[in-house]
Amino acid sequence: MNFIQAILMGIVQGLSEFLPVSSSAHLVFTSNFYKVFKGIEIVQQSNEEVFFDIMVHLGTLVAVLIFFRKDIAEICVAMWNAIKTRDWSEHKAKLGLYIILGTIVTLVFAVPLNVVAEKLVFCPQIVGGLLFITGLVLFASEYMSKKFEAKKTTVDLKSSILIGIAQGLAALPGFSRSGWTIASGLFSGLDRATAARYSFLLSIPIILGASMVYPIIKIDIHEALAFNWHAIIAGTLVSGIVGYLCIKYFMKFVSKFSLKIFGYYCVIVGLFCMVFFTIN
């Protein structure tokens, strides 16, 4: 892991984490393009690279915490008041429960898929195929969304379960987390802005959990001391800054425009990477 590679991957993570284009797929593509051009075998992946992936995800987690700090504070206060009064009728309190439920549903699907996801890091051509499928899902969600005359502006039990399942399936690189969760929100009748906001809030416990648990389980302390920490820290900071800006402008975009442009992007990039990495 060198400094330039870290900066590049930090930018890629910051841009793709919150756009419906699969950040994990783009990290796989970026890393493997670098290896192809450097003549390094794709089957090689160091623990430093895996740890760096976790760190840049942590950078984007900080971005979403800062951007939605007001929503998070209101949800926490509402849930605390609901616990004291035993009255869960307030919208923000119920939203907190739906985030917890969605996280549990996510874990049910994501944990068993994680073993497969780790192997797909070495199969960028398959990841390209999964990104292609994400594009089709985005097209389908836009089509289905038009069938709902009145769009819902609040998350309900059905939406939280469906979006939780989508986030769990997105453990596979190529299945965009934001893409699948927002699309699932549209499938359940939510408007784009509500689906995007809930998608981002639901990502917080999952990214936080992965960032805290993975290094403790996988990384040996002596090996960690040999990591290029300057590159890791720089990449993490870049991912957070780029991620914050991405959230800011994507929330404005998604409330007004269709997700089809991202669908086209996923289809084109997915097909290209399927062909490129199959040949190389």
Image (cartoon, rainbow, N blue to C red):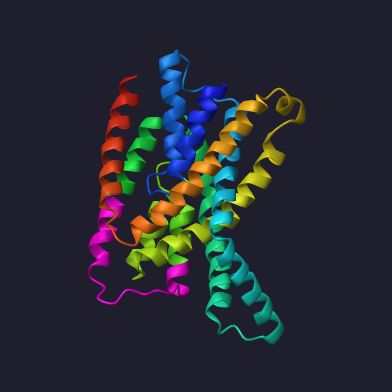
Q: In which quarter of the view is residue 72 placed?
A: bottom right
Image location (x, y in percent) of residue 12: 45, 36
Question: Is 123 left or right of 150, judged from the image as shown?
Answer: right
- At 43% from the left and 69% from the top, the residue drawn is 159
Residue at 54% over, 37% down: 238
Quadrant location of the C terminus in the rendered image: top left
The quarter of the image holding the N terminus is: top right
As drawn, is 193 to the left or to the right of 243?
Answer: left
Res 275 quadrant in image: top left
**Position of 96 relative to 36 (above/below):** below
Who is closer to the viewer here, 119 or 258? 258
User: Is residue 38 at all visible to an observer of this figure?
Assistant: yes
Which of 235 and 210 lies nearest the eye of the viewer? 235
| 275 part of magenta stretch | no
Q: In the image, is residue 144 part of the stretch drawn in magenta?
A: yes
Q: Which residues are magenta?
A: 136-160
Q: Is residue 7 above or below residue 207?
A: above
Please determine whether, in this image, residue 279 is positioned above or below residue 92.
Answer: above
Q: Residue furthest right?
A: 222
